[in-house]
Image (tube, helix red, strand yellow):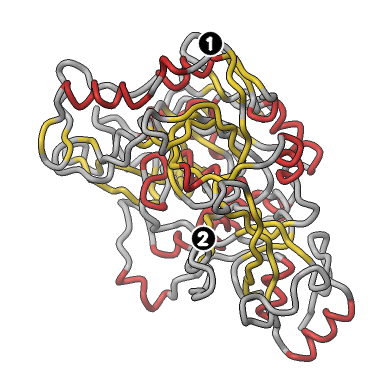
């Protein structure tokens, strides 16, 4: 048996290596090194209990089925330097309807009130022919008028003084400062009030408050929306905010999510959940306290998690993360094989429009996966399809046969798009191209529309949209990272 002691992601001293090997904690060591992140692999004995889409075999649920022994998939797609360049090329994601744009990290201590007003005023309103519901009853004009008052847009000054902070809970940004669920009748999964997910430790620029004073309007790296004040911890200065963005060492969540243990001494962190890709500031045993709320951190990583103090300012609280958790010291190496392995850890998870319900939609799932490598994808599928710094191929004018020929030559782990949807390409088997993605609905017979609402593997040639055309026919863009 060969044991790989060190890899480029490891910062563990040799003495600890020897101790861990002597103790026989190979599983924990493997997780600590992030040498081969793996999704849980279903046993073939249980294949008969798994529901699959048309043309999909149970063994296709295994990342190893697609990764195989291909050295091509283990080659590094982007170095850390190229990743930083890619992120910089795509950072201007805050864009108004009139075309004004900025990047979160370019926002200074003041910003144009007109920009804030246009961003905060670009809210959802139903079309005259559209009826939406709240608590089973049609939403009235009076309801929308009340929401408009809550926006408090007239209070936005010519120049806005910006405050900076961090999200402290896994939540969503809202179109209005309310948590009402508004959508089609009896459909609770598509809340039209949700704009985007907001993960713990996510940096925010605070630019406005609601009329009732209970909400902030904030900018993230890619979106603007409303978030409860209790979910935001403010920094004393922009300099502190920027410094916290780049911790010297970080522990990255590489599982579908990390859930901390129940903690009777800290309600904010008891059972706290962190989605895939979250980077937590990591501290050495020398820096961490000997005991964290009556626990000695043997067999654990110590991290510092930002929380909101009683005065609204940011404070750090130590937490312990078991070495057996699916986490990584530093970012994963950006290879196609690792992309596939990470994506399959989300297989079968719920679809969540805009990140609702601690879930994610098609573009959000890809953002979570690519965050594990330090790659910041744009928020929406349309923006992802236009991303700079990667090789883009226009498929819109090709026949289905030409698209299939193109896919046969395409590396697994590339991104595919058609209007309104983003997918991760897996490979082609017996002339059938396969993808994995977070799906709201599709048809398998060109007639019946299935409410899928799950991360699934499916064939592009055996899955159809509402117009009866296959997903393959609808493909418009291929994005390659090579």
Rendered-image quadrant of the C terminus: top right
Which residue is pictured at 40% across the width and 51% down the height? 455
Residue 161 image offset from top left, x and y in percent: 61, 23
Residue at 56% from the left image edge and 32% from the top image edge: 206
The reply to whether residue 412 is in sight is no
> In which quarter of the view is residue 131 placed?
top left
- Residue 203's x, y, as percent? 62, 40
Residue located beneath label 2 in the image = 257
Q: Is residue 327 left or right of residue 88?
A: left
Q: Position of residue 23 (x, y in %)?
A: 75, 91
- Where the N terminus falls, by quadrant? bottom right
Q: In the orientation shown, which residue stands out farthest toward the top?
A: 98
Q: Kindly identify which numbered label has been placed on residue 99.
A: 1
Question: Does residue 302 lie above or below 482 as drawn?
Answer: below
Q: Which quadrant holds residue 49? A: bottom left
Q: Residues within 10 Å of mark 1 (few under 14, many from 20)?
A: few
Q: CA distance from mark 1 to mark 2?
A: 36 Å
């Amino acid at each position: 048996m060969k044991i790989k002691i060190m890899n480029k992601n490891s910062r563990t001293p040799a003495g600890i290596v020897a101790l861990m090997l002597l103790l026989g904690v190979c599983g924990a060591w493997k997780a600590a090194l992030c040498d081969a992140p793996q999704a849980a692999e279903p046993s073939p004995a249980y294949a008969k209990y798994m529901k699959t889409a048309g043309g999909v075999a149970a063994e296709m649920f295994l990342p190893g089925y697609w990764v195989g022994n291909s050295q091509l998939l283990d080659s590094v797609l982007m170095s850390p330097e190229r990743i930083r360049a890619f992120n910089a090329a795509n950072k201007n994601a805050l864009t108004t309807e009139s075309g004004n744009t900025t990047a979160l990290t370019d926002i200074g201590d003041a910003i144009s009130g007109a920009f804030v007003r246009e961003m905060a005023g670009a809210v959802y309103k139903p079309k005259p022919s559209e009826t939406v519901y709240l608590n089973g009853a049609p939403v009235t004009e009076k309801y929308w008028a009340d929401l408009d008052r809550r926006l408090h847009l007239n209070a936005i000054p010519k120049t806005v003084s910006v405050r900076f902070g961090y999200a402290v809970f896994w939540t969503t940004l809202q179109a209005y400062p309310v948590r009402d669920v508004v959508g089609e009748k009896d459909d609770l999964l598509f809340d039209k009030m949700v704009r985007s997910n907001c993960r713990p430790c996510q940096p925010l620029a605070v630019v406005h408050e609601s009329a009732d004073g209970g909400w902030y309007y904030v900018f993230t790296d890619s979106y603007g929306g409303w978030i409860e004040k209790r979910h935001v911890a403010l920094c004393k200065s922009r300099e502190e905010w920027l410094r916290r963005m780049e911790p010297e060492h970080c522990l990255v969540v590489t599982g579908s999510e990390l859930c901390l243990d129940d903690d009777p001494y800290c309600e904010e962190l008891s059972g706290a959940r962190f989605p895939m890709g979250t980077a937590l500031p990591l501290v050495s045993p020398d820096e961490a306290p000997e005991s964290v709320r009556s626990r000695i951190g043997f067999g654990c990583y110590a991290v510092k998690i930002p929380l909101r103090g009683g005065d609204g300012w940011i404070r750090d609280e130590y937490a312990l993360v078991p070495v057996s958790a699916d986490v990584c010291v530093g970012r994963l190496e950006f290879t196609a094989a690792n992309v596939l392995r990470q994506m399959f850890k989300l297989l079968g998870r719920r679809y969540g429009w805009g990140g609702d319900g601690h879930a994610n939609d098609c573009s959000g799932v890809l953002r979570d996966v690519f965050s594990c490598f330090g790659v910041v994808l744009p928020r929406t599928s349309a923006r992802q399809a236009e991303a700079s710094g990667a090789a883009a191929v226009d498929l819109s004018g090709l026949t289905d046969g030409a698209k299939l020929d193109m896919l046969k030559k395409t590396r697994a782990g590339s991104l595919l798009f058609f209007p309104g949807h983003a997918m991760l390409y897996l490979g082609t088997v017996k002339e059938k191209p396969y993808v994995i993605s977070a799906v709201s609905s599709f048809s398998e017979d060109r007639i019946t529309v299935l409410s899928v609402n799950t991360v699934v593997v499916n064939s592009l040639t055996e899955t159809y949209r509402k117009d009866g055309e296959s997903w393959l026919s609808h493909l418009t863009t291929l994005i390659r990272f090579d």
